[in-house]
Amino acid sequence: MVSTTEMIFPKARIPYGTWGASYFPAWQTSPLAEVNIGQFAAESMNRILGIRRVPIKKLDYLVSASTVPWHWKFWNSPTLSSLMDHRVPGFHLEQACATGLQSVIHAAAEVEAGDKEVVGVLTFDRTSDSPASIFPERRAYRRTEVISDVWDNFGFDPATEKSMIAAAGNVARKYRLDRSEVDELAAHRYQQYFDTVESDFHQAVMVPLEILNVQGRSMGVIDQDLGVKQISISAMREMSELDSCVTSGTQTHAGDGMACLLVTNEEQAAELSSKPEIKISLVAKSEVRTGPSLMPEAPTLAVKRILERTGLTIDDMGVIKSHNPFAVNDLVLAHQLDFNWRMMNNTGCSLVWGHPQGPTLTRLIIEGLEEGVRLGGGYVLICGCAAGDVGIAAIFKVS
């Protein structure tokens, strides 16, 4: 067992029940494709905190995070807090798919330093209609370069000149994964998600949110993960391979959305939580970088490292949640740590409900902590990969 003194941020807490996320509609499937996602996220966080009975004036700092350029991004956190009608300092960060977890870690560091008591974490992204940038490039014969922010980066890692799909194929071949087991795992992930939809679980973590146009008229309510459809194992088997063990059914899809939570000191957590008897703390975090174009194996390496550092084992984890843009990620993790992949991602995962990048891991954290509470406490492991062959992992404790 890890003692409080051995925790990375012993003073920091996540107040239970003060979190929330939008649903994640798939790319170009909802009115979210037509709004300023930063403004939407800030206004949504204000609404979520109101629903959770947390006065916005309690915030004394804001960590915001996104990866896709949005109008006013230069002004980042200070503008976002102003949109909540509460002017506080803050900063903005991004690290591709690891953004959500890094935001929580940085918020915990602010609390641990003692200068801040209630730090808001606001993560968001809109991959729909991502901006195309035109910039001078004197080394190019055209004298200018154009980049479509989301799609060009998904398709090309400048360090390896390979796509993300190629990295998944490389890992599948390296670990000699069997296509039939990858398909079986992906089909199981879909079933886990749809079983959760039929339960009351999403009501505790997700918030239906109305989308307004510039005139303040309703464009609709986002109350489901639009674009997600059940896929049977037989349908999975019939899909063509895009690379080794990678099909349209065994990889995630781009999406839009936001997710938020609070990180506070112990006193404020007791005051703001809907169940103050529940204590949630951050035990440890680990980050690694693996070999070129081997991104899907990086979370496994990060998990191995964090378990070695804490003295915990995979069997000590009550909840395991992974950002798995490819089903390959989960299979490597399960094989290398010798555990049953059916026992993780019990309430859904990004493979199924999509990947808006900035808020992806934030939603996983929220879902993982809620599951940990419903299990009566224990350790919650969150892990995922990020662009650049990076893997990140963190262990939270619910008691």
Image (cartoon, rainbow, N blue to C red):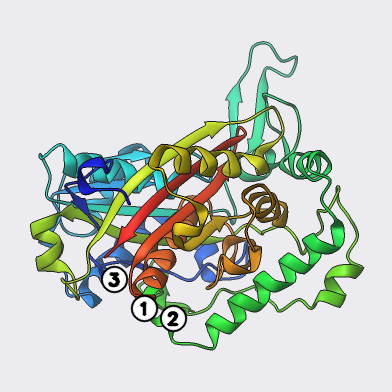
Q: Amino acid at mark 3?
A: Ile
Q: How far apart are labels 2 and 3 at the CA level?
A: 17 Å
Q: Which residue is at 69% across, 52% downward?
A: 335
Q: Amino acid at mark 1?
A: Ala
| Residue highlighted by disc 3 | 48
Tag 2 secondary structure = helix
Tag 1 secondary structure = helix
Q: Is residue 360 above or below residue 295?
A: below
Q: How far apart are labels 1 and 3 at the CA level?
A: 11 Å
Marks 1 and 3: which is nearer the front?
1
Q: Which residue is at 30% across, 50% downward?
A: 282
In the picture, the disc for residue 201 is 2
Q: Residues within 10 Å of mark 3 (few under 14, many from 20)?
A: many
Q: Which residue is at 14% across, 67% downward?
A: 272
Q: State yes or no: discs 1 and 2 in contact (Cβ < 8 Å).
A: yes
Mark 2 or mark 3: whose residue is earlier in sequence:
3
Task: Name the quadrant containing residue 397.
Answer: bottom left
Judge by depth and name the residue closer to the eye, 353 or 75.
Answer: 353
